Amino acid sequence: MRLRHIPGSEEEIAASPYVIQNPSGRKGCWKDVFGNENPIEIEIGMGKGRFIMELAALHPNINYVGIERYPSVLLRGLQKRAELELNNIYFMCVDAKNLAEIYAPGEVEKIYLNFSDPWPKDRHEKRRLTSEDFMAVYNQILRPDGVVEFKTDNRGLFDYSLEAIPKAGWKIADYTYDLHHSEMGIGNVMTEYEEKFSSKGNPIYKLIACR
Ligand code: SAM
């Protein structure tokens, strides 16, 4: 999702109580951010953040961090966040390639990747959020029993991920080519993109990766 730049978005994000400022200063201390020992789950590329805000409302005993690299996109999430009374969710405006500078080893329990940009050209492979380079970053920050959950409607990116993730030394614990008509879809929380594409009849693919 690439919105036109919204003037003032950086300033609004820098002043927001819902956005973690200087996130690398929190490395190893994320429990202090939330004031409890609850597990931490993150969504990389949250867009407008509907998915992660809904999860936070459903699971008050889990802490959530929504990550989005574009301020103009994150701003949309902030407007919605202000309407919610939740104390278990924050946002960060960072590129996911820097996550190992932000979380200590094992500080994250689960990573959600939803409708990640497909980057179909071969020369852009490293930008895909399921590439070997990104899986190596997740490997550094996830607990040993932690998982990555990935949903998309893009068959090319999904098939690529089913191959790339094992090459990066991970296992595919489960996957489906039709999430909304499979047992893996029980309790599924939809994202903005998921609603848009599934309403057009596109099947939704999902995989769960573990070490
Ligand atoms: N997850 C949302 C959904 O399913 O509705 C938004 C999907 S949108 C296609 C992908 C989002 O991921 C974009 O907003 C993009 O800016 C963000 N993104 C892509 N690469 C990223 C990265 N390396 N770090 C942080 N965010 C990233």
Image (cartoon, grey):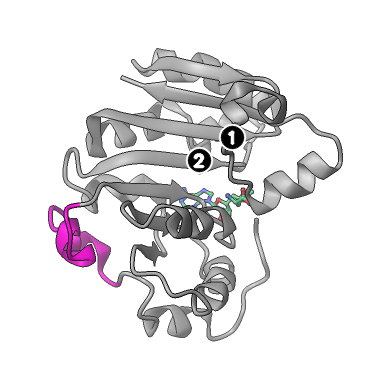
> What residue sits 47% from the left and 25% below the top?
208
Tell me if 110 is positioned left or right of 201 in this view: left
Residue with the mark numbered 1: 151
Start-end of magenta stretch = 21-37
Q: Amino acid at mark 2?
A: Leu
Q: Which residue is nearer to you in this view: 69 or 28?
A: 28
User: Residue 114: x and y, percent?
Assistant: 56, 42
Type of amino acid at the residue the image marks with label 1: Lys
Q: Position of residue 185 (x, y in %)?
A: 61, 30
The C terminus lies in which quarter of the figure?
top left
Instruction: State which tag comes first along the sequence, 1 or 2.
Output: 2
Image quarter of the N terminus: bottom right
Relative to 177, does residue 195 appear above or below in the rendering?
below
**Residue located at (42% from left, 64% from top):** 93
Q: Residue furthest right?
A: 200
Q: Is residue 24 above or below residue 114?
A: below
Which x, y percent locates residue 117?
A: 61, 43
Q: Which mark is residue 113?
A: 2
- 137 or 191, which is in the foreground? 191
Task: Report if the beta carbon of the residue with label 1 is closer than 8 angstroms to ligand 1.
Answer: yes
Residue at the spot 58% in from the left edge and 59% down from the top edge: 50
Q: Are marks 1 and 2 in contact (CB under 8 Å)?
A: yes
How much space separates mark 1 and mark 2, taking CA atoms?
6 Å
Q: Is residue 122 visible?
A: no
Q: Cβ of disc 2 within 8 Å of ligand 1?
A: yes
Q: Secondary structure at mark 1?
A: strand
Magenta stretch holds residue 178: no
**Residue 148 in view here:** yes
Image coordinates of residue 47 in percent, x first then y, are 57, 58
Number of callouts:
2
Element type at marker 2? strand
* Position above or below: 70 against 179: below
